[in-house]
Amino acid sequence: MTDADLAARLLDGDVRALARTIRMVEDRDGAVEEVIRQVRGRVGSAWVSGITGPPGSGKSTLTDQLIQRWRTAGHTVGVIAVDPSSPFTGGAILGDRVRMQRHATDRGVFIRSMAARGHLGGLASAAREAVRLLDASGRQRVLLETVGVGQSELEVMQIADTTIVVTTPVTGDAVQILKAGILEIADIFVVNKADLPGAAKVYRDLRDLVRQTKAHDAWPPPVIMASAAKGDGVDELAGEIERHRELISNNGELDARRRRRVEAEVEAIVVERAAERARTALRQGTMGAALDGDLRDVDPYALAERILNGHPPGA
Amino acid sequence: MTDADLAARLLDGDVRALARTIRMVEDRDGAVEEVIRQVRGRVGSAWVSGITGPPGSGKSTLTDQLIQRWRTAGHTVGVIAVDPSSPFTGGAILGDRVRMQRHATDRGVFIRSMAARGHLGGLASAAREAVRLLDASGRQRVLLETVGVGQSELEVMQIADTTIVVTTPVTGDAVQILKAGILEIADIFVVNKADLPGAAKVYRDLRDLVRQTKAHDAWPPPVIMASAAKGDGVDELAGEIERHRELISNNGELDARRRRRVEAEVEAIVVERAAERARTALRQGTMGAALDGDLRDVDPYALAERILNGHPPGA
C-alpha cells in the first residue's frame, strides 16, 4: 500500500495499517510524518489515560481490567506500554503475556510495547506519535503504561489526558513515591493490593497530601483503594476517569493541557533538529573546517549562532 | 570596573576579577560572554583534572592533598566543586570546610562550589565557563570535583583533560560503580581507603577490568591504591596525572578531545538557544497565534521548521 492508502486505511480503523504505521514510528521512518500530517485533522477524539507506578505495583493487571471495562462499555481500545529503562529492542511485550493472550482475538484491542532505543526524548516522541495514530484509527480509549516514576516516565505521562499513579503498601510509602514531580501530574491515585497490611495508611497519607496541596483545585485527585487481581476498585477507577474527562473537557483545562503539549512537542522537535543540524554542520563544510585550526580561535557562541541562523546542513 | 577592565584584570590573574566573572557565569549574566570572547585566545594552558566518585569516597580529601602537592610544585590552583543533585543555591561550599580554611589565606588557591540551579545542562555549561575563566586567569592546575556518577556528572567530566574516578571498598564493588559509562571516561582509577578490608579485591577487579577492555589502548588507565586521609598514594596520583598529560599532549589525543569538547559545547549552545527561540516564538506573534485556533490544524513539524528557519524571537 502507498502512504496515501496507509492514511486512508488508518482512518478506516484498519488494524494492519495501524500496526504498520506504529512500526514506522518505532523505526524512525520519516515517511510516517506525511501519514500523520494527513490524519491530523481526525485526531483528538480518543481519551488518553496514562498509568504509571513502580515495578510490581500491578499496573499491567489494572490495565487488563480497564481494557475489559472499556470493551464491555463498547469502546475500542489501544494500549502503548513504554519501558524507558529497558534496553531490549521493540516488538517484545511488557508485563504479563496472559493479558495479550486474553485479548489476542479481539480486534477491538490493540496492544503494542515500546522500549528505549536511542535517547529517551526519542521514546517520548515515539509514544506521542503512536498515541496519535491510535487516536486517528478510531480507538476511543487509549492507555499509555510506563514502568517507574523517573524523569523519562514523567515526560511520557505528559501525553496523557488523565494520569493515573499506582502505588501499593509494598512499594513504599506515599511520600517516597511522590518525589520528583509525581504529585503535580497525578489526576487519580490508586492504592493497589489494598488487602495487604499497611494499605489503609498509604491511603490516608495520600488523601492527606491531596487535601493539603490540592484541596482548592477544580479536580482534587481522588485516591482509590483497589485490588486489581480480584477486580476490586476497577469500576471506581473507570468511573473517575470518565468524571475527570467530563470535568476537564468542559472547564477549559483539556484545551490548556493540549496546547501545552503541542508547545512542548514543537520545542522537542526544534531541539532535536537543531542538535542534528549542529552535528551535521560541525562535521563538514566551513563549520567543520572552523575546528581544524587553533581551537582558541573558535568562538562557540558565534559558531552556534551561525549554525542556528541560516546555515542548514550542507550549506 | 568595566567589562574590558574585567578581561584585562582576569588575564592578569586578579583574584577579584576571577571571582566576579565566575559569579557572572553562575548568575547567567550575559555580559560574561564578551569577557570570555576577549580572553579566549589565552585559554588552553591549564591542565584540567576531573575527580568523581560516590559520596563518601574521599574525593574532597584527595582534592585537598592534590592542591598541596601542586602548591608545593609551584603551580597555581583552581577548584570547581559541582553538585548536580544539590538544590541549594550557589555560594555554599561542598565537602569539608577544613579544606577551605587551610587554603583560605593562600591566593594561589581559588575554590568555588557550584550547585544545580535551573536545569542540569546549564550546570555543565557553567562549570565549563568557570574552568575557562580559571584557565585564562593563569591557574596552572584546575580540578573539577563532582559528587556521584550519574549522567550529569558524566557531562561535567567531559570538560576534564584527565578524569579520575574514585572508589572505595565501602562504596561498593567495582563493577557496580563502573556502570553507566564510567569505564569509558576514566583515565585514572583510585581505590581510596585502601587500608579497609576488601580494598585488595576492588583493586584486582578494577585492574582486571582495565586489562580486559583497555589493554591495547595507548593509555590503559592505571589503578592506584590510596589512603588520602594519611596522604598515601597521592604522590602516585599526582605523578600519573602528569604522565597522562605528557602522553595525550603528544599523541594527538588531547587535540582530539578538545575538538570533541568544542563540538559538544557548540551543540549544547545551539540546543539551548533553539529551545529558547521555540519557547519565545510559541508565546507571541504569529507562532503563538497558530496555537490559538483548532490544535488539529497545527502541524508541529512545519511549525518547528518555521521556528528553526528564519523566525528569530520576536519576528
Image (tube, coloured by chain):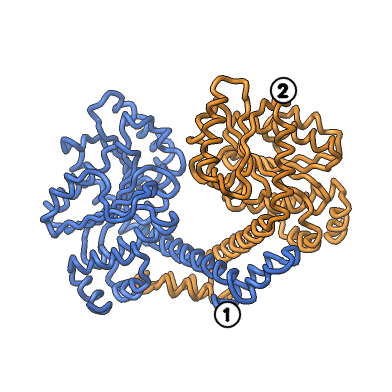
Chain colours: A orange, B blue
- B23, above or below A309, in the image: above
Is there one chain holding both mark 1 and mark 2?
no
- A211, above or below B133, in the image: above
**Image quarter in which the C terminus of chain B is found:** bottom right
Q: Nearer the viewer, residue B293 or B251?
A: B293
Q: Residue at x 30, y 52 (%)?
A: B144
Q: Residue at x 12, y 56 (%)?
A: B106
Q: Residue at x 33, y 65 (%)?
A: B25
Secondary structure, mark 1, is loop
Circle number at residue A272? none
* Whole-percent x, y for residue B112 in the image: 25, 56
Q: Residues within 10 Å of mark 1 (few under 14, many from 20)?
A: few
Q: Nearer the viewer, residue B295 or B188?
A: B295
* Quadrant of the rendered image containing residue B129: bottom left
Q: Is residue A72 left or right of residue B69?
A: right
Q: In the rendered picture of this protein, how many numbered marks are placed on residues?
A: 2
Q: Is residue A2 left or right of residue A238?
A: right
Circle number at residue B315? 1
Secondary structure, mark 2, is helix
Disc 2 marks which residue? Answer: A230
* Whole-percent x, y for residue A69 in the image: 79, 34
* Whole-percent x, y for residue A15 in the image: 85, 46
Residue B211 seen in the figure = yes
**Image quarter in which the N terminus of chain B is found:** bottom left
Q: Amino acid at mark 1?
A: Ala
Question: On what subunit does the disc labeled 2 rest?
Answer: A
Q: Is residue A136 left or right of residue B178?
A: right
- B119, above or below B14, in the image: above
Q: Amino acid at mark 2?
A: Lys
Q: Residue at x 80, y 38 (%)?
A: A70
Q: Residues within 10 Å of mark 2 (few under 14, many from 20)?
A: few
Q: Nearer the viewer, residue A294 or A201?
A: A201
